[in-house]
Image (spheres, grey):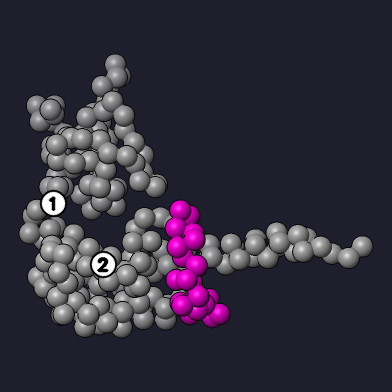
């Protein structure tokens, strides 16, 4: 019996998905490493004041974007080629949009800045707001206080990545927005910033 087209679909698809997962796993390891984080932060410190929250895009954005690609994208691509010799950045970014629901937000947000100037600009605007203290103040610890009968306290150090996710989920007014991919909602709970002392709780 001659093999049908369908008989090849699963192994090809599985191999493609496995390769994609391997690339994503490698990218996650790369962007979490200090060898990536430090030069990226230094680059943003150098240019964040150039970006303004207006509809008009400055001419200076383009050379900054190109320099970013030379520094950040090139570094990630070189690291990936060491891990996956057959890796091709152009092919990968072309398929990324179709797999965005399978990729963690922080990784997807980083990758999309390589191909989208508006996403690149938004990254700098968020960083500028953080530097100028216009974002949610996360300088203290995060305390989650249950309203259930058996209360509990869970504190996270301010260096925790979880705080970045909470800053997206909770607005200063206390409004609870929809959870993003990979986040855990805390329904019927109050979130307090600062000390864990009971007097500091709302």
Q: Which residue is mark 1?
A: 135
- How packed mark 2 is, by other alpha carbons closer than 10 Å (few <14, some 14-19, many 20 or more), is few
Magenta stretch containing residue 94, yes or no? yes
Q: Position of residue 179 (x, y in %)?
A: 34, 41
What is the C-alpha distance between the residues marked 2 and 1?
20 Å
Q: Is residue 82 above or below residue 170?
A: below
Q: Image quadrant of residue 147?
A: top left
Q: Can residue 57 be seen in the rendering of this structure?
A: yes
* Region rendered in magenta: 81-102
Q: Image quadrant of residue 120?
A: bottom left
Q: In this orientation, which residue lies closer to the viewer: 87 or 29?
A: 87
Earlier in the chain: of badge 2 and badge 1, it is: 2
Residue lying at 40% horizontally and 55% vertically, measured from the top left? 104
Residue lying at 37% horizontally and 67% vertically, measured from the top left? 111
Q: Dominant secondary structure of the magenta stretch?
A: helix
Q: Is 92 displayed left or right of 170 in the figure? A: right
Q: Is 2 displayed left or right of 69 in the figure? A: right
Q: Position of residue 51 (x, y in %)?
A: 13, 69
Q: Is 81 displayed left or right of 72 in the figure? A: right
């Amino acid at each position: 019996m001659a093999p049908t087209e369908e008989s090849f679909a699963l192994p090809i698809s599985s191999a493609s998905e496995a390769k994609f997962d391997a690339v994503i796993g490698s990218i996650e390891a790369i962007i979490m490493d200090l060898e990536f984080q430090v030069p990226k932060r230094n680059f943003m410190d150098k240019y964040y004041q150039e970006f303004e929250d207006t509809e008009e895009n400055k001419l200076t954005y383009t050379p900054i974007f190109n320099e970013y690609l030379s520094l950040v994208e090139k570094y990630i691509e070189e690291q990936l080629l060491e891990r996956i010799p057959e890796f091709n950045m152009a092919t990968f970014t072309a398929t990324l949009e179709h797999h965005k629901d399978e990729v963690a937000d922080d990784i997807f947000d980083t990758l999309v800045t390589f191909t989208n100037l508006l996403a690149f600009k938004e990254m700098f605007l968020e960083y500028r707001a953080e530097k100028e203290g216009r974002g949610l103040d996360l300088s203290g610890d995060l305390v989650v206080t249950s309203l259930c009968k058996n209360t509990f306290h869970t504190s996270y150090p301010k260096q925790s990545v979880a705080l970045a996710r909470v800053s997206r989920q909770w607005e200063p007014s206390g409004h609870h927005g929809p959870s993003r991919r990979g986040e855990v909602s805390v329904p019927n709970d109050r979130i307090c910033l600062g000390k864990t002392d009971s007097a500091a709780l709302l």
